[in-house]
Amino acid sequence: MATLPPDDLRRAVREAARRLRVDTPRLTSGSAEAYQAGLDVRLDDLREAILTAWGRGVPVSDIAADAELTVSTVDEWIAGVTPRIS
């Protein structure tokens, strides 16, 4: 697998965060189960993008800014804490 440049890794984080932000209201039109399943998929996508960027050396502060999350939240996700949206 080719290594992506930091700008592409950061773009992937921003895109995953955007999909979560844009799609979450749309998911409410279905059942509670569909909402949770859709939310879980989008959170997993964001977490994967965050972990990939971090694993390739992108600074946590940049990842947090791109994901529109706090640095402490990104640190928790990296440490393996399950993300929650309330």
Image: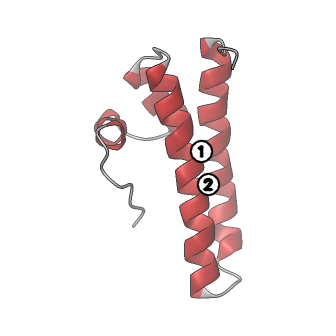
Q: Nearer the viewer, residue 13 or 44?
A: 44
What residue do we see at 33% from left, 42% from top? 73
User: Counting other residues with Cα less than 10 Å from the Cα at mark 1, is it few (<14), some (14-19), or many (20 or more)?
Assistant: many
Tell me where residue 60 sits by quadrant.
top left
- Say whether residue 86 is left or right of residue 45: left
Pointer 2 local density, CA inside 10 Å: few below 14, some 14–19, many at least 20: few
Q: Secondary structure at mark 2?
A: helix
**In the image, what residue type sits under mark 1?**
Ala
Q: x and y percent of residue 80 in the render?
A: 32, 45
Q: Are marks 2 and 1 in contact (CB under 8 Å)?
A: yes
Furthest residue in direction bottom, as rendered:
31
- Name the residue that disc number 2 marks: 21
Residue 30 drawn at (x, y percent): 69, 84
Q: Position of residue 69 (x, y in %)?
A: 43, 41
- Residue highlighted by disc 1: 17
83 lies above or below 70 = below
| 58 sits left or right of 83 in the view | right
Residue at 53% over, 54% down: 43
Task: Report the quarter where the N terminus lies.
Answer: top right
Total labels drawn: 2
- What amino acid is labelled 2 in the image? Arg
In the displayed structure image, the side of residue 7 where residue 75 appears, left or right: left
Furthest-front residue in this view? 1
Tell me the tag on residue 85.
Answer: none
Colour mode of the rendering: secondary structure
Residue 22 drawn at (x, y percent): 68, 56
Of residues 2 and 13, the one drawn nearer to the viewer in this rendering: 2
Which quarter of the figure is the C terminus placed in?
Answer: bottom left
Task: Report the residue at 65% width, 46% height from top.
Answer: 18
Q: Callout 1: helix, strand or loop?
A: helix
Q: Residue at x 59, y 44 (%)?
A: 17
Picture layout, residue 45 above or below residue 52: below
